[in-house]
Image: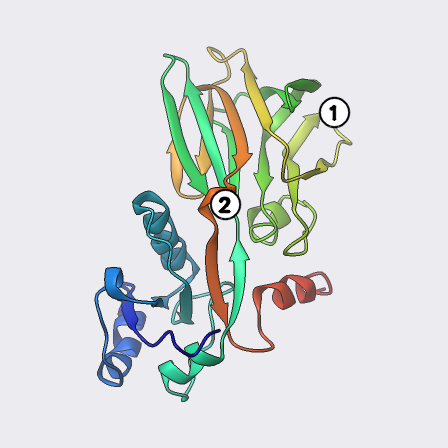
């Protein structure tokens, strides 16, 4: 992290824990508005950091973010510390995160475009099993996947929903994507695939009248989709800052040895 980045903006979650913890922090530094800052200091949990990152994507305001964990899990955050915030930011290591772009086409023909930092998921809306056609780079690889759904995860998101669905953990910087089925019924033994992040992944919903499907890009949901197309948004790269020795890459690596 370059030491000349001294202008910091403070963004705090509205949770009681974050608000209480940020009180001392707000008095310990001279803060500027987010649009004037070199770095955004984000206080809260992973969910709030994802919210801030999505706001940046929508506004095309790309600034490095240093997260301070005053939430629950804090996988994307740094621990709270007695060091001054300026010193911590100056010592921090940069990690680049590349989001996905989802183009979901609903049954009425409308296009809904959203970004996903963790994953794009297709999920059944009712008790009926979802039936999906799976294509990569325009070629159908699976005519029908029956189950609760499927997801495409980035390396940064591979330890989130993807891991819960028994998907693979992807090293950061691997330039790969995880294609993971969610409770597959047919083919029952298909475990998914690992794809290069240059791939264009497409899904077509089969029997949408009987088996409606929703598409979710992180926190944005689109219901009654007919087809969904997913690409890597290389021109919307994000930067996260981590304390030395505790970068996201090291955390993802360590996650593979958890038992």
Q: CA distance from mark 1 to mark 2?
A: 29 Å
Q: Position of residue 75 (x, y in %)?
A: 52, 64
Apparent side of residue 237 relative to residue 59 in the rendered image (left or right): right
Q: Residue at x 49, y 13 (%)?
A: 208
Quarter of the image where the C terminus is located: bottom right
Q: Which residue is mark 2?
A: 99
Compared across the picture, whether 26 is left or right of 185 comes to left
Tell me the colour scheme of the image. Answer: rainbow
Residue farthest along the front direction in this orientation: 4
Q: Residue furthest right?
A: 189
Q: Looking at the picture, how far across and down is residue 63, in whole percent?
A: 37, 59
Tag 2 or tag 1, which sits nearer the N-term? 2
**46 sits to left or right of 204:** left
- Is residue 242 positioned above or below 159 on the image? below
Q: Secondary structure at mark 1?
A: loop
Residue denoted by label 1: 187
84, above or below 206, in the image: below
- Residue occupying the far bottom of the picture: 82
Whether 71 is drawn above or below 158: the answer is: below
């Amino acid at each position: 992290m370059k030491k000349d980045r001294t202008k910091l903006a403070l963004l705090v979650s509205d949770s009681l824990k974050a608000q209480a913890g940020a009180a001392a922090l707000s008095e310990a530094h001279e803060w500027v508005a987010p649009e004037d800052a070199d770095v955004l200091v984000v206080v809260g949990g992973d969910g709030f950091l994802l919210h801030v990152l999505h706001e940046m994507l929508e506004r095309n305001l790309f600034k490095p973010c240093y997260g301070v964990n005053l939430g629950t899990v804090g996988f994307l955050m740094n621990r709270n510390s007695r060091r001054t915030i300026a010193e911590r930011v100056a010592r921090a290591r940069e990690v680049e995160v590349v989001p996905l772009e989802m183009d979901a086409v609903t049954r009425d023909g409308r296009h809904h475009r959203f970004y996903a930092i963790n994953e794009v998921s297709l999920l059944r809306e009712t008790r009926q099993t979802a039936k999906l056609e799976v294509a990569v780079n325009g070629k159908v690889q699976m005519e029908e996947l029956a189950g609760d759904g499927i997801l495409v995860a980035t390396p940064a998101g591979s330890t989130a929903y993807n891991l819960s669905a028994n998907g693979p953990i992807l090293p950061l910087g691997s330039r790969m994507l995880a294609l993971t089925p969610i409770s597959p019924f047919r083919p029952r033994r298909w475990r998914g695939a690992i794809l290069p992040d240059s791939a264009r992944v497409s899904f077509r919903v089969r029997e949408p009248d009987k088996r409606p499907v929703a598409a979710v890009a992180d926190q944005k949901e689109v219901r009654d989709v007919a087809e969904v197309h997913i690409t890597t948004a290389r021109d919307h790269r994000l930067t996260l800052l981590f304390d030395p020795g505790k970068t996201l890459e090291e955390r993802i690596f360590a996650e593979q040895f958890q038992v």
